[in-house]
């Protein structure tokens, strides 16, 4: 088993994107490789300006719950998604965007934050990444 | 051999680990990286990460509300 973490980021919820990026950055910090495969609602977070626009998975309350949660996170000095993403890229994390989701959602590469994306692929790309990963998660 | 100081006081999971890793990447072999923080989990986990990266932990120092961990690249 290679020292590698592979995560399918299927959810576009803000809190779940936090989970994915925190596990990823912890893996990178501890010397592992990381690949994130963004698909379905998760892919929407890679749209230009989309990183922060996800709802809270529970108690979103039309945005009020999310606002309160962000306030509490700020008070506890939790890093922003931009910071986590910048650290992820700096430590060599890899991002794959699901091409089928792009077709379904009518997204072109120009609609996405291309600076984050290393590769565009389908299930075969994910399997090649995951088959030798010690940690695989679906978030 | 240089001593590199990393200040992660006030930072929480996963930032102390990430900043440690960034500093290790930039350091030269033999350099000492001294990380100062106040997050309880990170005090446990930075030595775990050092071990995973095959780096020596030179010491863990406790101050009033902070800790300093020294690791060698």
Image (spheres, coloured by chain):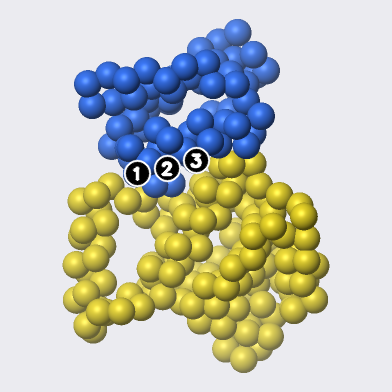
Chain colours: A yellow, B blue
Q: Are marks 2 and 3 in contact (CB under 8 Å)?
A: yes
**Quarter of the image that includes the C terminus of chain B:** top right
Q: What residue sits right under mark 3 in the picture?
A: B18
Residue shown at 59%/68% (left/top)?
A: A137
Name the chain under label 2.
B
C-alpha distance separating marks 1 and 2? 6 Å
| Among numbered discs 3 and 1, the one appearing first in the sequence | 1
Nearer to the camera, A7 or B26: A7
Expressed as whole percent of the image width and height from the top left, the position of residue A130 reads 73, 66
Task: State whether residue B48 is above or below residue A5.
Answer: above
- Looking at the image, residue B29 sits to the left or right of residue B12; the answer is right
Q: Is residue A42 visible?
A: no
Checking the image for residue B15, the label placed there is 2
Q: Are marks 1 and 2 in contact (CB under 8 Å)?
A: yes
Q: What residue sits right under mark 1 in the picture?
A: B12
Residue shown at 59%/15% (left/top)?
A: B31
**Quarter of the image that includes the N terminus of chain B:** top right
Nearer to the camera, B39 or A28: B39
């Amino acid at each position: 088993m290679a020292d590698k973490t592979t995560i399918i980021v299927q959810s576009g919820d803000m809190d779940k994107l936090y989970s994915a990026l925190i596990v990823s950055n912890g893996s990178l910090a501890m010397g592992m490789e990381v690949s994130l495969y963004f698909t379905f609602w998760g892919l929407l977070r890679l749209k230009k300006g989309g990183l922060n626009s996800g709802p809270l998975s529970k108690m979103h309350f039309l945005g009020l719950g999310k606002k309160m949660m962000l306030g509490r996170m700020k008070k506890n000095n939790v890093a922003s998604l931009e910071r986590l993403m910048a650290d992820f890229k700096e430590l060599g994390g890899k991002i794959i965007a699901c091409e089928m989701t792009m077709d379904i959602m009518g997204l072109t590469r120009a609609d996405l934050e291309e600076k984050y994306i290393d590769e565009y692929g389908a299930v075969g790309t994910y399997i090649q990444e995951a088959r030798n990963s010690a940690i695989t998660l679906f978030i | 051999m240089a001593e590199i100081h990393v200040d992660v006081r006030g930072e929480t999971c996963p930032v102390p680990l990430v900043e440690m890793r960034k500093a290790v990447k930039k350091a030269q072999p033999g350099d000492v990286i001294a990380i100062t923080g106040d997050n309880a989990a990170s005090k446990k986990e930075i030595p775990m990460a050092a071990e995973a990266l095959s780096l020596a932990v030179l010491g863990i120092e406790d101050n009033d509300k902070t800790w300093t961990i020294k690791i060698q690249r």
